[in-house]
Amino acid sequence: MADDVGERLRAARERLATLKARVAEEHARLSAGGGIAEAVVARGEMLRRTGATPKRRRTLEGHYGKVYNVNWGSSEEKVASCSQDGKLVLWHAPSGRKLQMVPLRTAWVMTCALDLHQQASAAVGGLDDMCTVYSLGGTGISTPTCELVGHEGYVSCCRFTRGSATIATSSGDATCGVWDVEGSERTSKLEGHAGDVMCVSPSPRDAEQLASGGCDSTARVWDLRVNKATHTFSGHESDVNAVQFANDGTTVVTGSDDSTCRMFDMRRAGELNCFRSDKFVGSVTSVALSRSGRMLFAGQDNNQVAGYDCLSGDSPPVYALRGHTGRVSCVAMCPSGEVLATGSWDTTLGMWA
């Protein structure tokens, strides 16, 4: 038995030595050829081409107050929005039709989420300090099926995880929570932020990971198995209003009141890129990544959406999506990556492609 373990250990060490040698050879080759950056650029002009500017294909009208949040389900057909008019609306995105309107118990709503399984339920949260789940698809007035009570401050963001079984929330009480919908109970309480937590994003790859951003100017990644933060990302100089995992499950993007978006990598535990425009001074309210992760869209309080090329680093936006006449409060990319939804204080939603 000991001989077998020793043999496996020797084989592993030999493989490690071989890999180290290959890495050293590749590094020397790139250095001799002018460096890694030049090697990447040499792959061709295609790296700099980002395609035509997305156009506003449809405007969804029906809210009578500021739109605060928009969220897709599991397809590009249905999208949910919530507004200061006290309504949750489920839309058929391709046609712009309202599928259902749900009167909420309070008009002071800040966030909404559509379940990721059958899109048969939606959750909302706001200044009532709780997350409320409604069933969708009925013919009558939808009533709450579940109330998740436990936060001691406003609920700033909620997102379904694991289909429709659990919901992640962030709150003004400086905590995040993970809730079992069926049991209406909190299964995890995440503490560590030094101020209000403004946003959460479940990992698309690991159901036990969650990202958050808060008014302490940091973003954090949590391990739900131990209810502790495994990564704390600093760099922003003001509140972090938005956070999102990339589809690779190792990259996190953020948007802040300091007018910047930043990209962080969990593997190197640090910042990869900072995106800003010299012409913009204001708040980034929301962020959304393209399906490939190439493009980063940032909702801004100057009524525009900035589109950044994630391969270009500290360069200005390559897109400026104009059309809203009020603060762009939310952006969301549909699961297929073909449509970007925006919501604004001008009471409308935009569908861009």
Image (cartoon, helix red, strand yellow):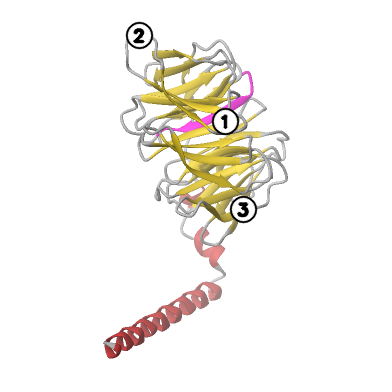
Q: Which of the marked residues, 2 or 3, is nearer the chain's N terminus?
A: 2
Query: Which residue is identified by label 3?
Result: 233
Snapshot quadrant of residue 337? top left
Crowding near the residue tagged with mark 1, few <14, some 14–19, many ≥20 C-alpha atoms within 10 Å? many
Q: Amino acid at mark 2?
A: Gly
Q: Amino acid at mark 1?
A: Val
**Residue depth check, mark 1 versus mark 3: number of the one nearer the observer:** 1
> Which mark identifies residue 140?
2
- Label 1 close to label 3 by CB (< 8 Å): no
Q: Nearest the camera: 209 or 295?
A: 209
Snapshot quadrant of residue 181? top left
Q: Quadrant of the N terminus?
A: bottom left
- Report x, y in % for residue 84: 58, 16
**Residues at marks 2 and 3, CA–CA distance in whole angstroms:** 46 Å
- Report x, y in % for residue 72: 42, 29
Query: What span is colored magenta in the figure?
Result: 325-334
**Residues at marks 1 and 3, CA–CA distance in whole angstroms:** 22 Å
Tag 2's secondary structure? loop
> Which mark identifies residue 155?
1
Q: Is residue 272 left or right of residue 204?
A: right
**Residues at marks 1 and 2, CA–CA distance in whole angstroms:** 27 Å
| Residue plotted at (58% across, 49% down) | 220
